[in-house]
Each structure stands twice: as structure tokens, then as C-alpha cells.
Amino acid sequence: MRVILTAFALLFALGLRVFAAPPTFQQINQACGAPLLADENLWDDDAEAVAARLGWPRESQTSHDSSYRLYPPPEARFFGARPYSQVLLAEDSKPVGLSLVFANKGDAVTAVAGRLDNRAARARRTELREYQIAIGQDEKTLADALTALLGDPSNDRFGQGRETAESVSRWNWNGHAFLLAAPRGEYVALRILPADMADTGGKSRVADDIIRARALSRVEKRPNGDVVLRDIPMVNQGPKGYCVPA
């Protein structure tokens, strides 16, 4: 009888987890530690309003695209981990995605050009080991927080092309996809995207012919023969010691 009751209790507990109501947007905000959402749908918000409530300054503005970027202070946390870079991207004033980078081997900048002496080489190896430990810790912190909030993730691929696609853990919530990438010993990145965009590996929802027309409209040919590319977005490299963000 006791065995039957124990098994029933286990099944009942599992059933509660399977059929539990999804979290509210307030619970999402509480878990990530920021006013990310104003309601159940981020993607119909005004991008300026989203950036304002997050406190992320505008980085760039073109005819159709805008971006907002913050290099937060050391005490900042997002889903419990320290972000080093936070970016909101928008098209035609509507958010199309967020990208947050956490511990990143590229931030280990002890190495200098040329040959390192023994002391510098040891310092470099120590710094790299510390970042690799931090990468593992951040991956676990983010995965644990998202799993506690949204349940177990699925395995997915994100990116366009064989060379740039990466393996990600994916959680879905109300048309939003949370993608956690953590290549071993390299970096930890969290992307929040519309679910349909995540389904296509991040491909823009703007048709290719529209993108081509926009690109051509930015080419200005002047009478003196100069060709100028106008309306190009800017990326603020900030405190980073490398230009990959740009």
C-alpha cells in the first residue's frame, strides 16, 4: 500500500509539472531581474519604450534599423549571471531580438603582441583558466534559472550556414524563444528572439528582395565619381579590446 501511494504521489508531482501554467510576464521579469516585458508580447512594443525601461542607450539609427547597447557595471545580473554586453535590435521601430554576452574568453586580454615572457605567459594561462571556469558557471546559472522558470529545454541549432551555426538550448514562452549558447571554453550568449525567427535560424523576417532594395538605396553615386554608402549602422565597441562586435 505504501509503495502504491508513493508511486501515485510521484506521478501526481510529475503531472503538476507537465500541466503547470506557464509563467506570467511579471514572473519572467522577476526571474531575469529586469523590466524586460510590459505584457505578454515583447514584439509588438515600441523599441524605444523597451530600451527606455531597460535603461539601454541608443547605439545606432538608420532608415529601418536601430540598436540599443549597454556595457553594464560589474554588479549587473540577468537571470542571475553577469552580462558583459546587452543589445536590443529593432526593425521599423519594433524589437526583433536581444543578445546578451556573459563570460567570454575574448575578454581575457592579458596577452600582448609579440612574444610573452614566462611571467606574462603564466598570467595569461591563469586568466584563461579563470574565464573558462566562469564560462561554465554562467552557463549553469542561466540554464538552471531558465529551466526552473520554463521547464526542460530542447536542443536546437541557430545561425545561417555550416560555419556560423551553433548548438543551443532552447526554451519557448508565448512566441518568445530563449536560446542559450555555450561553446566549450569560449563564451556564453543568451538570445531572445521571436519564435518564428528562431525556427529559421535567425533569418530576418524582411523579404530578401526588400533587403536588396534597401541596400541599393543606400548607395550614392556622386558627379565627381565618388561612391558613398549611406545609412550604415554603427556599433559601439565600448570597453572591448577586440572588434568582433563591430
Image (cartoon, grey):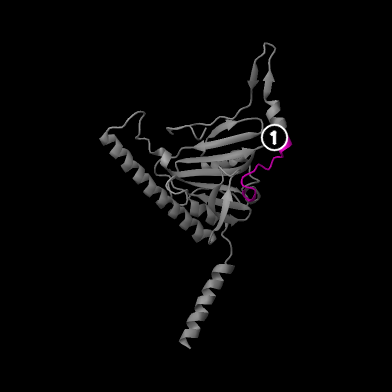
In x, y percent, where is residue 44? 66, 46
In the image as oriented, which residue stretches furthest toward the left? 119
Q: Which residues are magenta?
A: 198-209
In x, y percent, where is residue 32? 49, 51
Work out whether residue 78 or residue 166 is closer to the camera in this orientation and state it.
166
Decide: is 122 above or below 149: above
Report the magenta stretch's main SS.
loop
Decide: is 152 above or below 91: below
Q: Quadrant of residue 206?
A: top right
Q: Quadrant of residue 210?
A: top right
Residue at 48% across / 88% down in the picture? Answer: 1
**Number of callouts:** 1
Judged from the image, the secondary structure of the residue bearing numbered disc 1 is: helix
Q: Is residue 182 left or right of residue 40?
A: left
Work out whether residue 58 or residue 53 is closer to the camera in this orientation and state it.
58
- Tell me, yes or no, whether the highlighted magenta stretch contains residue 201: yes
Work out whether residue 71 or residue 140 is closer to the camera in this orientation and state it.
140
- How crowded pointer 1 is (Cα within 10 Å; few <14, some 14-19, many 20+) is rated as few
What residue is shown with label 1? 211
- Tell me, yes or no, whether the highlighted magenta stretch contains residue 102: no
In x, y percent, where is residue 200? 65, 48
Give, as a three-letter code, the residue at label 1: Ile
Residue at 59% across / 56% down in the picture? Answer: 172
Decide: is 223 above or below 199: above
